[in-house]
Image: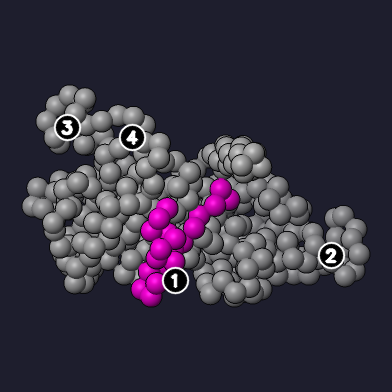
Amino acid sequence: MNGQELVSSSPRHPRTPSDSNHFVLTFENNRFASELFGQFDQNLKLLEERLNIDARARGNSVVISGDVVTTNQARRTLDYLYEKLQKGGSVERSDVEGAIRMAVAADDQLSLPTMERKAKLTMAQVSTRKKTIIARTPTQDAYIRALERAELVFGVGPAGTGKTYLAVAHAAQLLERGAVEKIILSRPAVEAGERLGFLPGDMKEKVDPYLRPLYDALYDMIPADKVDRAITAGVIEIAPLAFMRGRTLANAAIILDEAQNTTSMQMKMFLTRLGENARMIVTGDPSQIDLPRGVKSGLVEALQLLNGVEGISIVRFKDTDVVRHPLVGRIVRAYDSTYAAEAEEVRRQD
């Protein structure tokens, strides 16, 4: 454990002996301790808010009081973040949020293979030469590990959960390691009533707006000049789904994004492109389907048909996995609850 623990018997707020806990964590490096606690102790305040504990800084020490479960979660969170600082990393608010989520999961989800109860946090990560991304939620952790072991992975759930970003990061990692020879990124060119024929420009100019999120993720993981050279050389290919027909995609990391906007035939066509030594990742949000009314989503159908098939992993993200602004998670929950109520009303009328 990074913080030296000193136990006191007088908690700030009295609790019953069975559920109270009170201790002091002392961190040897004063600069790291200051970064760990945050400006004006903002990281400790976040711990207090999320875990309902007291966390008060005293120099390079922190006094933690609360119930046994949540104070241990706070200890694991601080130990993990301090170790991250020791390894040359930084601690932002999002890192604290992620570490808290994982610490809570250690108690709520004892079967999670990446956790050690009452011990250190271990989070899956994706690394390229330019950037290392560490899981911020238990589902992200499971997703990264699924990407490492399965040949075909479905990552489904609401916006802001990191589905596409982590998929592109994993593909970049495979390319750097030499595990694959190329990256193929694709999306169906269907968006909220827009059709390619009505857009100005040549084919590349027509489809680029649909593929922009994939470009952005690539540039985050690989230096821009290398991305541009790889695209020119065909090592990285970014194309609409229609361009996949008739091909066999071997020795490649293949990502289909926004898969909820594929038809059943498009999804079958894409999945059957999988060739030798290829890894395929399909991401999408079944609640954001832009297909014409009456057209069944290929993603929704595939999730039903392929559930339990050997070699395929399906990872489902929830609104609690949103890692953008906290308000995004609340927006997703508000929409989901409204849609669920409307669906229930339709069901009753039928």
Q: Name the residue nearer the viewer: 294 or 166.
A: 294
Spatial distance from mark 4 to mark 1, Cα to Cα?
31 Å
Between the C-alphas of marks 2 and 1, the distance is 44 Å
Q: Is 302 part of what is drawn in magenta?
A: yes
Mark positioned earlier in the residue sequence (4 or 3): 4
202 left or right of 111 in image: left
Mark 4 or 3: in front is 4
Spatial CA distance of label 4 from label 3 is 15 Å
Q: Residues within 10 Å of mark 2 (few under 14, many from 20)?
A: some
**What mark, if any, has residue 132 been given in the picture?**
none
Asked if disc 4 and disc 1 are in contact, CB closer than 8 Å, the reply is no
What residue is disc 4 on? 191
Quick check: 264 above or below 276?
above
Quadrant of the image occupied by residue 69: bottom right
Q: Residue at x 78, y 69 (%)?
A: 7
Which residue is label 3 attached to?
Answer: 205
The amino acid marked with disc number 4 is Glu
Q: Does the magenta stretch include residue 266?
A: no
Visible residue check, residue 172: no
Q: From which residue to which does the magenta span run?
A: 300-320
Q: Is mark 4 on a helix, strand or loop?
A: loop
Say which residue label 2 marks.
20
Q: Name the residue tied to disc 1.
A: 308
**x and y percentages locating residue 45 in the rendered image:** 68, 46
Q: Are marks 2 and 3 in contact (CB under 8 Å)?
A: no
Distance between the alpha carbons at the discs numbered 2 and 3: 62 Å
